[in-house]
Amino acid sequence: MQVPILNYYEQQPEENTFVDIMADITHKCNMTCKNCYIPNRDVPDMDLDKFVDFLKRLQGRCMIRIVGAEPTMNPRCMEYIKAVFQHGHRCILLTNGLRLSSKRYVDELHASGLRHIYLSLNGVDNDDWYESIDELRCAKKKIKALENIVARRFILDTGTIIVPEVNEDAPERLLHLFEQKRVKNALMRIKNVGQIGRFQTEMDDNVKLDKLVELCSDQFKISTDYINSFRDKKIYGLFQEKNSILFPLKEGNKILNRGLWCKITNWDTDNESQIPDPNSKRRGRVTENFMVAPLYEHIKMNEGGY
């Protein structure tokens, strides 16, 4: 078996160079998704006081990604979010959305100051897809969460993993769902199975980047040339990401949804490190000792543990 070659390092918060930082505030979850990179549920919740101290010391104005396993399983989730804003950083909550099927809970998130949510929609509105990928028939709760998020006018990102022979029609179905629920502005993230953690499929069977482009082209009714014209452009105008393509859902005078964008991402690991996006200067992760490490290198170093 090949030993991964990792460029791993840790930074003090005062020396931070990352723009996006993942903070895993809990390892608990109310789902058992096959692709989860955090299989260990026995790790205690992140210490809130130490997290606040970390934020005080953190260099730069960062996007703090409040994640878990499932961050809403931490009963003090709102306090972590408030702390991020109190110390001058930006915040997004990455969630499976089950608790957000409660309007009251979404109202509480809004009251905390949160305005940006990433909602996992691997099965879109199809229970069979959710059962196959996420091991739970939860479409009804997912749709209710989406409705609540839209009603509160959050900035919305959605994440959908394309699994061969399971949900390859997801892009078209997602676009239809957005039209049905009057989603006016969103970033739709379409990606393959990340080859890290509890990954679901062998890499050779994974959907490659060109296939993802083809699926989106066919189902959005826009050309592959149009999508590929964004292939080498910087993501958000800042970062060159060879594994991602970010584009608006319009081509010439054809506008599918004026405020809808799509980001296609290939999480294959065709590299010596055996991780996606090696040596990223953008993505960091809060470590167990409240340092900052490169995200995927840290996950790989702690696979099966933290």
Image: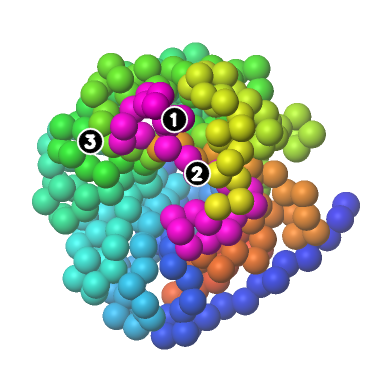
User: Where does residue 117 sit, x and y in percent of width and height?
Assistant: 31, 45
Q: Is residue 24 visible?
A: no
Kindly give the residue lying farthest to the right in the view shown: 1
Horizontal relation, residue 189 to residue 191: left or right: left
Callout 3 secondary element:
helix
Kindly give the residue lying farthest to the front in the view shown: 253
Q: Quadrant of the C terminus?
A: bottom right
Q: Nearer the viewer, mark 3 or mark 1?
A: 1
The residue that appears at 38% across and 81% down in the rendered structure is 59
Label 1: how many Cα within 10 Å (few below 14, some 14–19, many 20+): few
Q: Nearer the viewer, residue 75 or 163?
A: 163
User: Which comes sooner in the sequence, label 3 or label 1?
Assistant: 3
Horizontal relation, residue 4 to residue 201: left or right: right
User: Which comes sooner in the sequence, label 1 or label 2?
Assistant: 2
The disc at residue 149 is 3
Q: Amino acid at mark 3?
A: Ile
29 is higher (above) or lower (below) than 282: above
Callout 2 secondary element:
strand
The magenta region covers: 234-260
User: Where does residue 178 sit, x and y in percent of width and height?
Assistant: 32, 24
Q: Which residue is mark 2?
A: 246
The disc at residue 252 is 1
The disc at residue 282 is none
User: Where does residue 232 sit, x and y in percent of width and height?
Assistant: 61, 51
User: Which comes sooner in the sequence, label 2 or label 3?
Assistant: 3
